[in-house]
Image (cartoon, rainbow, N blue to C red):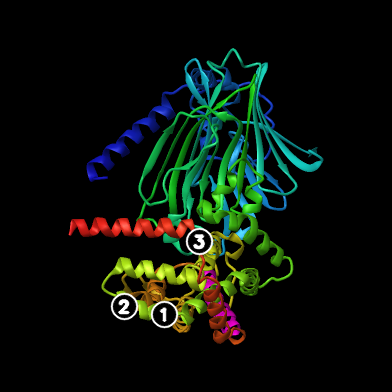
Amino acid sequence: MDKNQATGLLLFAAVILVYSLFFASSPEPLPEQAPPVQTEAVQTIPETESIDSTESEPDSVQNEQLRQKFGVFADAAEGSAQEVTLENQDIQVVFSTKGGELKTVELKEYKTWAMEPLRLLEEEFSTISYQIPVQNGLIDINELYFEVSQKELTVDEVPAKQVVFTAQLGSGAVIRTYTLQESGYLLDHQIQFQNLSNQLSNQQVSILWEGDLRRLEEDLKESRLKTYMNYYTADGDYDYLTTGNSEDEVQVSTPLHWVAFKQRFFTSSIISDQFFPTASLSQSTDETSDSIEKSMSASLVLGLAGDSGSVQYYFGPNNYNILRKIAPDFDKNVDMGYFFVSWVNKYIIVNLFHFLEDYFSNYGVIIILIVFIIKLFLLPLTYKSYIGMAKMRVIKPEIDELKEKYGDDATKMQQEQMKLFGQLGVSPISGCLPMVLQMPFLLAMFFFFPNSIELRQESFLWAHDLSTYDTFFKLPFTIPFYGSHVSMFTLLMTVSQIAYTHFNNQLTTAQGPMKNIGYIMPVVFMFVLNSFPAALSFYYFVSNMVTFGQQYLIKQFVDDEKIRAKVEETKLKNVNKKKSKFQVKLEEAMKSADSKKKKKQ
């Protein structure tokens, strides 16, 4: 403000003061009225103060403004805001009597990475707005004031608590009822319009849910990659926006059953039994923010049955055993992997993990036990694989002879090899097939450990949190594709894999590039897994060591001379044996391919 503006303001104030003292008439005294009885507010919302403090406007003018804006709902447009708490053993929900809407939802059992209270909804970062259609447009229920009552009841023979918000509108009312059972993360919500059907232009309520999802985990980059919006349609289709960091949005014309704001280990969701007829979903990422993972928005339409509609809210952990009981395909908020490995996680690993949890509290010990149990279960396959490789090893002299004789003719070489394998009763894939059958278990862990909330903030040895990478020491620089930290579990896994490869190469007939590739892959995985959860690297390390031990023990009990004797015995039996139809067709196919190749040359 410059000097001239200050002078003008002072003169204007002086004129107003002189006029008030000497020329303005005194106001007539108002008749005394009993002050309205109000419940003491725990926290007053600023908008309330602005309405209540407008003393310079006559009441009639203010009432007329509210009447024009809210119509019949103007009766509930004034009041004071109070906080109301509803809680069970798992969550605490705080409401406001202004709107009868959620203010905060806190999970009691969990903390953020910074060890602060973990809230999946906070009014500073998230808003849920219910808008009702009237002749003049939409009215936001969050602008109305409600009276509140609470009670305890039984729902499906389970004790529950209920809070009821009522906005009285003459002969009608808007009623919002929330019910929370004694445990769990589901919050039931019913909205009812009593004697207001003539005020609503249609039987639908618009729901707008917007939220900035706060950072909950230490590894922000990994959390963002696993934070996205999921939804499930009435047709039984599960879908999501993206799993990357790009902005994305979609208009869904198919009715939806549920929509979820899914973070790495926690999910906030709204679920409808009657389906949402249409929806508009969007999400975006602010890469410059280190406190917000993603921003999401869901615009939904809730159909009313008669004069009411209902939804359920889920605010809780991404625990598979909990989610699968919430709604159809709701368990997909936990990524169990592709279809060919997800069955291993859902039906074996999850149940085994929770069984061991009942007896052991150290999750490092649980991981070790899981390795031993799985390896024991797969031992017959491991034994069969070793025997297959041993047979290939003992017939190596015959194979070398074929290479010397037909080395320049690849087709003839393959034909003679197949003939030899048939005579000796040896299958070249006998050593590989058992390993392939074990792959689903190996790959299943690649999805289970990074998404297992049970490992969140659980320490083991030098790893302070098994759900993220272990930092044995920090580097003063960043290595491309590796990072600026060294994961000791990943290093141990790499060394153990190289040692196992060296041992395995002594048992196989692999030569050339195929023999050396076993040394390259562990190094590649060292770069890949350096920033993956410590639990995954530790599992692979223990798995390598147990496999190494199994093969060492098997070697002590398997005699190559006996295997050779058995191969010779099979050879004598198959001297006059006719070729199988498969062998005949295979040889014909190889000859045909060879002749076509020669014609092209």
Q: Which residue is mark 2?
A: 405
Residue shown at 58% from the left, 82% from the top: 549
* Number of the label disc, if any, that sits on residue 217: 3
Task: Identify the magenta region.
Answer: 534-555
- Give the alpha-carbon distance from disc 2 to disc 3, as whole Å: 63 Å
- Visible residue check, residue 464: no
The residues bearing labels 1 and 3 have C-alpha atoms spaced at a distance of 59 Å
Quick one: which residue is furthest to the top in this view? 198
The answer to which of marks 2 and 3 sits earlier in the sequence is 3
Q: Position of residue 29 (x, y in %)?
A: 59, 22
Visible in this render: residue 376? yes
- Looking at the picture, does residue 156 appear above or below residue 544? above
Q: Position of residue 77 (x, y in %)?
A: 57, 26
Q: Mark number for residue 398? A: 1
Q: Residue at x 32, y 73 (%)?
A: 478
**Secondary structure of residue under mark 3:** loop
Single out the mark in the foreground, 2 or 3.
2
Q: First in sequence, mark 1 or 3: give its number.
A: 3
Q: Under tag 1, what secondary structure?
A: helix
| Nearest-to-viewer mark from 1 and 3 | 1
Residue 519, given in percent of the width and then of the height, sits at 39, 78
Query: What is the chief secondary structure element of the magenta stretch?
Result: helix
